[in-house]
Structures are given as structure tokens and as C-alpha cells.
Amino acid sequence: MADPGKVLVLGADGFIGRHIAFELRNAGWQVLAHARRPERLAAMGFEVLKADLTQPDAASADFWQSQVAGVTHFVNAAGVLNASDSIYNAVHLTAPAALYKALGPQARGVLISAVGIDVSETDFARYRRKGEALASKHSMTILRPGLVLGDTSYGGSSLARALSALPFVTPVVGDGTQQFNPVHVADLARIVDSCLQGHHQDHALQEIGGPQTVTQADMLSAYRGWLGLNPARLLRLPLPIARKLGQVGDLMQLGPISATAVAQLSHSVLAANAHPQARGFTEFLRTRPAGTQDLWQARLYLMRPVLRIVLALLWLASGLLGLFLPSDHFLPLVPALPDTLAILMARGGGVVDLAIAYALLRGIRPRLLAGLQAGMVLIYTLAFTLLAPFLWLLPLGGLLKNLPILALIAIAAVLEEER
């Protein structure tokens, strides 16, 4: 088979971008995979391009010109769901404009957009519309997929699996009758390949959906059955409550638990066209059995916010005790230290603990924060082991409790990493 050319996939480390990169490589393309942190894509065997679209250099056509030698085609699968205006602008407009200019009119391009942005007034929809207008000026094909699902999952699709796997009930936003015609991400990737190779009308805007329409409630129930779980009663979340949960998710930076996601789920997401290359929801759900990893991922997904809140409460309580507990309650535990030094350490440790609690609740640098938490627990454990070793022998656990706390911190760090 003839080599179709070299294609740049912008946003290749995203859920849709990864599938597109793999499909194009399997179809014979030379794939240049872009990401902000492309190390894992490199480990998967891709030629990679490292660039942070929010940085000033990505707004320069000269920067891209030096990176895209030999590229004949490109796919823009980059995007952000929840961000500030400056980041939305950089990712959806400024950086793509510089890239399009660098590639020139001879390169064939595809933009991955989203269904429903014409009737939505979220920031995401507003910037997606602007991104489409920019792509139209460069004669790109614009694909608007509806709800995208797959054998793997990320973000909203992971949240759908998690909701379906909850014990006793299956929560839905609103009454659960919102309609979707999901498209499998592998089918979408094959459609992208066809567009790049000129098998579809050029420079067109196409909505891409599957041939089967399901309600939100039916979709989650089907996922529950796919995971091998017995049916559960629907729990209909009133929209005001769902919106509040979305706002909490925004505050804690919990990704798919966001006001934007709730706004999207509160309405039907129906693509106008059922693409002939797309399978129906029931068909692709039955393509393979759910494995242990699928069930574990679904059940553990919502443990991420649970663990984060539990650890935040632990550090909050520790910080408040360190700051405000009367000194006569803890000085007898460390008789080897001068009283002034012991009090200073308790108050200083309280400040650090409260800072950790705040960072946990706001979702600030979770991987770095996990290391800081583990370091603090180890420091406390070592210090008290040297100063008051009898604390290991207390009836209710004492220092022994630090061992499961370290394990929880490690598990939380694993769950924070979705990609």
C-alpha cells in the first residue's frame, strides 16, 4: 500500500487524539504526534512533537515551521473543556492559527469539534465556534462528533462508566430522558482517515453520530449490564443539585465533574447524521467483554474525589490541632525537646498541614502534592519514632496509622493520573 503521507495530530495525547494517532499509523501514515507531555506517546513508538499550546512560542508560525518539515496533512484534536479565557484562546485560536499559517494551504486538514455548540452558551461552545470559523478560513474539513465512546475511556466517558457501576443506584442528570447517538472513537478515527485521503467532501462541516439513539438512562443501564452488574434503581438528580455538584467539581478541578459537563448532559446530544462507517451503541458495546480492568476503573473512578476529600480533612484536622491545641496536651509526648522548640514545630507543622489541605481541595499539582504529603508523613513518623518511640505501641494505633495513610496517598496519586 502506498504511503499516504506524513500527518501531524495536534492533541495526540487526548482520548480522541490517541485513537486517531493509532488508527492513522495502522493505516500507513507517518504520524507526528503532538502533546504537551509526549513522553508516553514516544514510548508507544510515535515520532513526537513537544509543545505547550498555552505558551507564547506556540503562537509563532516560525516555531511550527521548524517542527513540521515533511507534514502533508494534519488533524487538530486539541481542546480544553474547562479553562480560563486566556487558555481557551491559546488552545483553540492562537496556537492553531500559527500552525495553519506554517503548514500553508497545500496541507489537508481536519478539525475535531463538537455537536451542540450552536445552541450552547458555555465558554467551551463559544471558543469551539471561533475555532471552526478559523478552520473555515483555511479550507479544513470540520467534524462535529456527538457523544464519543470507546473501548478505553477518559473524562466524560469514564464518568458515565463510574455512574453506571455505583452500588444500589444509577444516578442520571435530570430525568435521564436526554437522547444521544454515540459514535465509537475507533469509527471516528477511521472517518478522519477517509477525510484526509479525500474520500469525503472537502472543506465541509459534518456532524458525526451513530445510527442508534439511546437515552441517558438507557445508556448507563447498558453500561452496567456490560460490566456484569445487576440492574439498579435510577436516581434522578434534579438539575439545581447537579449544577451545584458541577460547581464543586470546578472548584476542586475534578475534570469531567464540572458545570460544563452538567450543562451538556442536561440536554440531548444528537448528531444530525448517522455516518455509514459508524456502528450503533449496542453493537459496539457487544464487540468485546468487559474485563477486570474495566470494572476496577469504573468503581475506582469516583474514589478519586473521595480520597482527595478524606485526605484534605485529615490534613485540615492535623493543621488545626497543630495551631490551636494547648501546648500542655502535647509537650509531655516529647520530653526530649525544649518546650519552645516543640511549640514552634507544632505551630509550623500546622501551617504546612493547612496548606496541604487547601491544595488538595483545589486540586493543585496533584502529583507533586502526593510527594509532599508522603514526605510530611515520613518526616512526622521518623521524628516521633526518635523522640517518642512508645507512640508505636499505643492501643489505638498511634504511629501505626501512618502506614495505611501512606498507602492511601499512593493510591490517590495513581487515581489522579488519567492519561
Image (cartoon, rainbow, N blue to C red):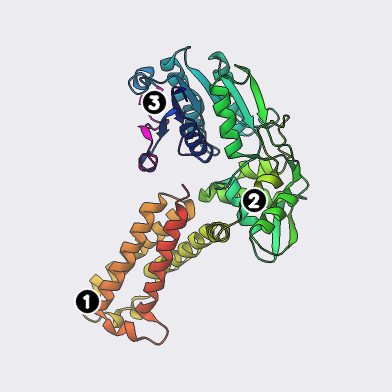
Q: Residues within 10 Å of mark 2 (few under 14, many from 20)?
A: some
Q: Is residue 86 left or right of residue 188?
A: left
Tell us which disc is closer to us: 3 or 1. 3
Amino acid beneath label 2: Lys
Number of the label disc, if any, that sits on residue 134: none
Q: Could you say whether the residue bearing mark 2 is in a helix, strand or loop? A: helix
Which residue does the image show at 39% across and 53% down from the upper left? 367
Taking the spot 66% from the left edge, 56% from the top edge, the residue there is 226
Q: Could you say where residue 334 lies in the image, as x and y percent from the top left?
A: 27, 79
Query: In the picture shown, does residue 318 fall above or below 335?
Result: above
Q: Which residues are magenta?
A: 41-59
Could you tell which of marks 1 and 2 lies nearer the N-terminus? Answer: 2
Where does label 1 land, which residue?
A: 337
281 within the magenta span: no
- Give the residue type that dot 3 points to: Ala
The 10 Å Cα crowd at callout 3, few under 14, some 14 to 19, many 20 or more, is many
Foreground tag (1 vs 2): 2
Question: Label 1 is placed on what type of residue?
Answer: Leu
Which of the numbered marks, if any, corresponds to residue 58?
Answer: 3
Any magenta on residue 45?
yes
Total number of numbered labels?
3
Q: Which residue is mark 2?
A: 244
Find out whether the residues at labels 3 and 1 contact each other: C-beta distance under 8 Å.
no
Tell me: residue 385, above or below residue 176: below
**In this rendering, would 351 be left or right of 417?**
left
